[in-house]
Amino acid sequence: MKLRDIETKDEVLAILSETDPQAIEKIHKEAYDVKVENIGSKVYLRGLIELSNICIKNCLYCGIRKDNDHVHRYELSDKQVLEAAQFAWEAGYGSLVLQAGERISSEYVGKVTRLVREIKEISEGKLGISLSLGEQSRDVYREWFDAGAHRYLLRIESSNPELYSKIHPANNLHSWERRVQALKDLKEIGYQTGTGVMIGLPYQTLEDLADDLMFIKSMGIHMVGMGPYLTHSETPMGSLGITTTDLSLTLKMVAALRLLLPKINIAATTAMQVVDPEGREKAVLAGANIIMPNMTITEVRESYQIYENKPGIKDDAAISKTKLEMNLEKNGIEIGWGEWGDSRAFVRK
Ligand code: SAH
Ligand code: SF4
């Protein structure tokens, strides 16, 4: 099996199809080596602030979808967000992510613009800001970019339009084509652009997953966050009873992506930690280089459950930080404190 300089879907598919434990270990090791040779061994941290769980969408898999009446809806105040940003700054995270359900009101757009400016101000322009706030118009993306955000995460969820339509309601709020267009807009505006997929979705095949990685390559994406699909019992898809129980396919996806695109940033995501308590560390050892420690205040963590069994729900930002540091140290993984850790696949315009 070819592991270096892979380029084709068939080569990716061969990696994803591997079942021999020794061969899989070799794939992970090779992906780790390729990472170290191309972008170094450090892991970069992005403190995660879950700004709000209010959402206009109804993605069939997500626990905070609009129609889930069991969710207590919240939106953090400016003060709460800025306190979290201050924590990130003092902790040496280098960067933070503002994530939320999707909303499009002008008041909300203005709030995000204000927050981005203020975070830049309190950190003397040094704290990097990523946004993960769903699909927005080009003008809104531009407004937030001009305010100081420089990275945006918007997962394609699946590169297969047919599969996409099975996991989203049939209305024009949920359109695969629009999502692709949003990714193109983000790139054109100048964001370091991130996307990703869920792994182990109902109806998803290995071929779909190989196509996902080829999609990421063809779109010229700079950063990727992928993770196992996890059930939430209060969702239409959750009632299908299919859930992800092991991390092996996700780790193969991370390794294959690293071998395909040696220079991009790849996140070891929280969903990996749900399936395996050391899932994130294992992903780092299979080629990932970014971790997003949760900094959301404890009071609202319980309300931001896009999937069930989210870890650290009773923790605060400091506890999440200590636990992560301990786990990384145990695995001999070094942290790039205070560094942005920009994607080496990104060329500033
Ligand atoms: N509303 C924004 C950001 C929050 S959701 C957006 O949708 O882009 C962030 C990500 O959580 C989604 O892109 C999706 O890939 C992931 N997610 C949602 N529900 C999930 C589930 N049940 N299992 C695993 N990941 C899930
Ligand atoms: Fe809303 Fe994002 Fe969940 Fe979809 S995945 S329902 S857009 S929070």
Image: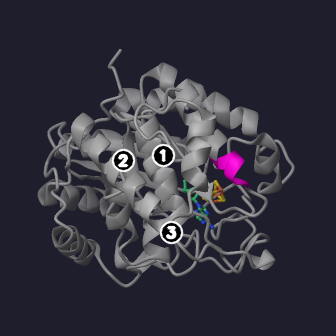
Q: Are marks 1 and 2 in contact (CB under 8 Å)?
A: yes
Toward the bottom, the furthest residue is 314
Residue at 58 percent across and 77 percent down: it is 245
Q: Is residue 107 visible?
A: yes
Residue extent of the magenta highlight: 205-209
Secondary structure type for disc 1: helix
Image coordinates for residue 29, horizontal then vertical, percent? 33, 54
Q: Main secondary structure of the magenta part?
A: helix
Image coordinates for residue 99, horizontal then vertical, percent? 46, 54
Q: Nearer the viewer, residue 38 or 2?
A: 2
Please name the amino acid that badge 1 sits on: Ala
Q: In whole angstroms, how far apart are the C-alphas of marks 2 and 3?
A: 16 Å
10 Å neighbourhood of mark 2: few (<14), some, or many (≥20)? many
Please name the amino acid that badge 2 sits on: Ala
Q: Nearer the viewer, residue 290 or 172?
A: 290
Disc with the residue nearer the chain's start (2 vs 3): 2
Secondary structure type for disc 2: helix
- Judge left or right: residue 291 versus residue 269: left
In terms of image quadrants, where is residue 13? top right
Total numbered circles: 3
Q: In whole angstroms, how far apart are the C-alphas of marks 3 and 1?
A: 14 Å
Please name the amino acid that badge 3 sits on: Leu
Residue at 25 percent across and 55 percent down: it is 85
- Nearer to us: label 2 or label 3: 2
Mark sitting on residue 247 = 3
Residue at 49 percent across and 25 percent down: it is 187
- Judge left or right: residue 123 versus residue 9: left
State which quarter of the image contains the C terminus. Answer: top left
Residue at 74 percent across and 59 percent down: it is 58
Task: Say which residue label 1 marks.
Answer: 256
Mark sitting on residue 31 = 2
Disc with the residue nearer the chain's start (3 vs 1): 3
